[in-house]
Image (cartoon, grey):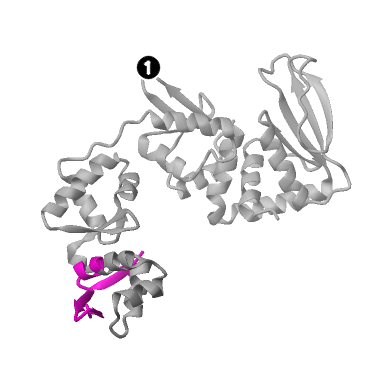
Amino acid sequence: MIKQGEIAQCVGLWLAEGDNKSKSEITLTNNYPKIIVFFHNVINNLIVSQNLPRVYVYSSSEDQKPCLSIDVEHKYYIDKRANKPYFIYRIADVQNVKKWHEIIEKFKQKTEFYSFILQGFFAGEGNVKFIKKSRSRIIRISQGKQNSFLEKVLRYCDIKFKYSRKERTYVMTGRTTLERLCQLNISSLHGIKKRKLKNMMRTYKQYHYPRDFLKKKLYNYLKSTYTSSQLAEIFKRSHARITKILINLKKEGKIKNFRVRSKSYWIRLDKNTIIISKRKQEILNFLIIPKYTFEIANHLNVNWKAAYRRLKELEKLKLVKFNDDLWYKIKTSKEVKII
């Protein structure tokens, strides 16, 4: 079953580099085999044609005869200018060209698919340029002339851009813009471009926060429960750095951590929250009436010592108390969160 997002990606591919003027055939040109295969699979599910599609393969020598992993006729030609083989996918069918144009117009009106269309544009005509010496990082989308629809998509996706008439390309620079493009998963269709983009983004250094900025941000985040590993991922800092700040906040009496299944979960003290495991919750639910330790151990199907350790941990949290050989559940005003 073809997803709507995949159709939108093909719309972007075709708008970027397809033959938009022809009324008798649907064509797509690309030198990345997976793009042609992807386009074929989507189109084949959308359009039932009497005319079988063909793939025209152009390479610089007769020795190069790549074959795509789709069951369509391949025709081979020589193009001395080709640095690498490229493919032209073609379906000749007047009626289905009309249907395809209707699909194009339908998706151009749906802003919720603009990020997918942009992925198609980038897979078709996009490139990544990184100049190590000057640390210049650029994402470009080639277009022979300014494209009002592409500009509409870029603005909707909150992407800053400029069009270079000299280079006939849309240019996007700046860390905020490039990170936004990565959030939109712009390179999802093209493996080579994806690797280049990932390698380029790795050359950015970590953001440097002002003094105590990270500490304040962490404290604000801890209105909800997080582990130190989760916070390290969110703030793009080492686990050791995050842990050091958390320990300092704990020493200041601002946050508290709870151990659940060998992990520490952190939360602000003013949230008045206790964090426990599902096993401890099971014990609390069992203590509707006071129980002996061996009764709780039997209920949990564990030995006496294991049950006793869990009970002592609950006692420390002031959720149970021990009196006359029996364990009692204690009412609490705090929110008990189960993890």
Q: Is residue 115 visible?
A: yes
Residue at 64% x, 40% y is 13
Residues 64 and 88: in front is 64
* Quadrant into which the N terminus falls: bottom right
Q: How many marks?
A: 1
Horizontal side of 37 relative to 268 (left or right) equals right
Residue at 28% x, 71% y is 336
Q: Is residue 171 visible?
A: no
**Which quadrant of the view contains residue 61?**
top right
User: In this picture, is 199 found above or below 300?
Assistant: above
* Quadrant into which the C terminus falls: bottom left
Residue at 35% x, 77% y is 295
User: Magenta region: which residues?
Assistant: 312-339
- 311 is within the stretch colored magenta: no
Q: Residues within 10 Å of mark 1 (few under 14, many from 20)?
A: few
Please state the horizontal and vertical placement of residue 327, each as a whole percent of the image. 25, 78
Please state the horizontal and vertical placement of residue 137, each as a whole percent of the image. 41, 28
User: In this picture, is 28 found above or below 7?
Assistant: above
Horizontal side of 185 relative to 21 (left or right) equals left
- 329 is within the stretch colored magenta: yes
Residues 252 and 103: in front is 252
Please state the horizontal and vertical placement of residue 226, each as a whole percent of the image. 31, 56
Label 1 SS? loop
Q: Amino acid at mark 1?
A: Lys
Residue at 40% x, 71% y is 300
Reading the image, the residue beneath label 1 is 133
Horizontal side of 17 relative to 258 (left or right) equals right
